[in-house]
Amino acid sequence: MVSRMIDIRIPATSANLGAGFDALGLALNYYNYVRMEESDRAEIISLDGTVVPTDESNLIYASAKSLYEICGKDFKGLHIEQTNNIPMTRGLGSSSACIIAGLAGANRLMGNLLSLDEMVNLSAQIEGHPDNTAPALLGGIVTAVFDGKVVHWVKQEVHPSLKFVVIIPDFELKTEKARACLPTEVSHKDAVYNLSRAALFSASLLTGKYENLRTAVHDKLHQPYRMELIPHGREVFDIAYSLGAYASYLSGAGPSIMAIVDDENRYFTGKMRFSGDDIGLSSWQVKGVGIGKEGTTITEV
Ligand code: HSE
């Protein structure tokens, strides 16, 4: 069999969108890239200099290998070249991007044995929740319920007049730590607080009632606890609102903070940058991003 080489492009993602904890997520238009080819051993190269494991513990490699095993196919090894644009442990879906790269790449190299729905299910089973993995595969904004086996999902498009500006701290926050700080139980009142806002968020975003977004991103399940782990986080939220953001929320498990603005607020990114500098956050990145409409794409080289 002639060995095939493929290029995989996987978007960054922003999960939760405030109140939609473990349920809502969107894909962004900046990407990790992975070149993959079957080989007789593990050969892993990081093209951008990011330090990644270069043995079988590499997340892309391990995810790909697991799919070969699930499908009962012989696996000898893979040649992987990865370009890691998505910053790691910043709440922008870097680990789901690796899982998706491995699964999607392996699936293509084996001749697309799994359907898109099966890929969505499997990636959520591996990652534990679907709000990063589903949009990374599907693109757009995704509403997802994972019942433990199957992801029930809807993908929708976000109006192009909306812009997303991500503010990325200069420190990491591991998802395990950001989940460990959450309470194991919540009150009925807090559950209602969140579910009503998550529903309002989706309906408002998709019908253009953007003035609701500020209320809709408030939550009582995760952000108040995680903000304690993010020095200057509250100031950044306040600045974003003072500069006219519709909404500001913690991206995924944090520590990155996302602001939603419309394209009439043209200088928001620059103003956010200057305001960050003023409060001593010049080492934080401020990046204007759009929605990744397509999700993961694969091309044959
Ligand atoms: N919904 C997840 C969380 C996203 O907030 O912990 C991170 O994987």
Image (cartoon, helix red, strand yellow):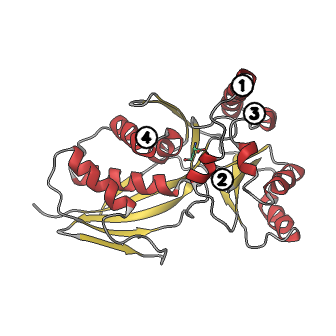
The amino acid sitting under disc 1 is: Ser
From the viewer's perspective, is the residue at label 1 or at label 4 nearer? 1
Position of 12 compared to 226: left or right?
left
Q: Earlier in the sequence, mark 4 or mark 3?
A: 4
Q: Earlier in the sequence, mark 2 or mark 4?
A: 4
What's the mark number on residue 293?
none
From the viewer's perspective, is the residue at label 3 or at label 1 nearer? 1
Label 4 vs label 3: CA separation?
A: 25 Å
Position of 113 compared to 59: left or right?
left
In percent of the image, x 47 and y 45: which residue is there?
A: 133
Label 3 vs label 1: CA separation?
A: 19 Å
The amino acid sitting under disc 3 is: Ala
Secondary element at tag 1 = loop
Residue topped by disc 1: 187
Residue topped by disc 4: 124
Relative to 226, residue 125 above or below: above
Locate residue 111, reporting x and y percent. 21, 48
Relative to 281, residue 160 above or below: above
In percent of the image, x 57 and y 64: which residue is there?
A: 87
Mark 2, residues whose alpha carbon is within 10 Å: few (<14), some, or many (≥20)?
many
The amino acid sitting under disc 4 is: Ala
Label 3 vs label 2: CA separation?
A: 18 Å
Locate residue 73, reporting x and y percent. 16, 50
What's the mark number on residue 254?
2
Secondary element at tag 2 = loop
Secondary element at tag 3 = helix
Q: Earlier in the sequence, mark 2 or mark 1?
A: 1
Q: Earlier in the sequence, mark 1 or mark 4?
A: 4
From the viewer's perspective, is the residue at label 2 or at label 1 nearer? 1
